[in-house]
Image: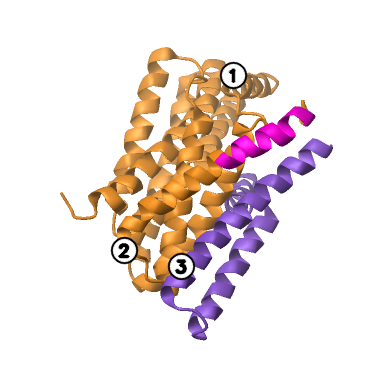
Chain colours: A purple, B orange
Amino acid sequence: MNIIGDVFKELFKMFVADLRLTLAILGGIIVVWILLHKGLIGPLPAGLLLTFYCFIVLAEAVIREARQRSQR
Amino acid sequence: MPPDFWTIMFPAITATFLASIVEVVEAFTIVLAVGTTRGWRPAILGTLAALGVLALIILILGPALQFIPIHILQLFVGILLLLFGMGWLRKAILRAAGILPLHDEIEAFAEESAALQSQTGTQDTLQWIAGIAAFKAVLLEGLEVVFIVIAVGTGKGLLWEASLGALAACLLVLGIGAFVHKPLAQVPENTLKFGVGVMLSAFGVFWTGEGLGVEWPGADLVLIALAAAFLLLGIGLVRLIGEKFARSIS
């Protein structure tokens, strides 16, 4: 039972190392999907948007964590 | 040589190989602690049992996922790879910049050995506890390898190739470990983690995009550009936060 619990904990940690980063990635994907399927942007700009959005959320997550740890 | 060897197959196998080295090194440290503290029988039996469970997961999940339509599969796998890859990259950047401490195999070995030595009970109970410790370590570290093998392998039908990459890493680490007989603290785990995080993030953006209906310029070739961009961003962030925040922490 303990091992099964640890397995689920490990699986959760694999994808949710930083909850805000995880939610930001999922939110960004949903926004790109909506923009693409409503025809508001084309397939190529959608790819660029997804790419740059991922860069921004990664940078934000890293800087946020560094700032929090430096203030402790 | 397949036309997508350098753009898909090589990065996929390299990613599983390098990621597996990171995880197997961590699992090996625990197995070594079990072996040197309680003997090699529980260490080997626990390891083999966990490897059997992991192989079973790949054998069941891998072929089962191939029945899912490719666009849905790529979107699903792409999102998971993005979450996992960017999580690894974030951690590797923070460690490389000195914000988070590096994983220390010597310390992990000492902690596990001390934990095993503090256990009390009959010889059979102690052997059982040691075997479970080895089983759990290999299973938990192996889960990440299994995920990477399945995620990278199923996106383009490279399950066997990705599995071989993981197996090669496993044999390499175990071979070296058996030879040196101490924790593999010299392995540059964070550098490997950084590289794998870059590759998995690039795969994640690529397949999520494909699943959403994005048309990438240059098709598979864009993966190289994505990986290069994540690498440059990662290096840039290490420098930025290293200079800005690491000094205030120390």
Q: Name the residue rendered at 72%, 44% in the picture.
A: A65
Residue A45 versus residue B199 in the image, above or below: below
Q: Which residue is mark 2?
A: B219
- Residue B23 x/y as whole percent: 49, 36
Q: Name the residue rendered at 62%, 34% in the picture.
A: B95
- Disc 1 residue crowd, few under 14, some 14–19, many 20+, Cα 10 Å: few
User: Gap between marks 1 and 2, in whole Å?
Assistant: 44 Å
Asked if disc 1 and disc 3 are in contact, CB closer than 8 Å, the reply is no
Residue type, mark 1 in image? Ile
Q: Name the residue rendered at 32%, 35% in the picture.
A: B168
B66 relative position to B130: left or right: left
Q: Which residue is mark 3?
A: A47
- Residue B232 x/y as whole percent: 50, 43
Q: How many marks?
A: 3
The magenta-colored residue range is B236-248
Q: Secondary structure at mark 3?
A: helix
Q: Is residue B68 something that shows in the picture?
A: no
Q: Name the residue rendered at 35%, 65% in the picture.
A: B217
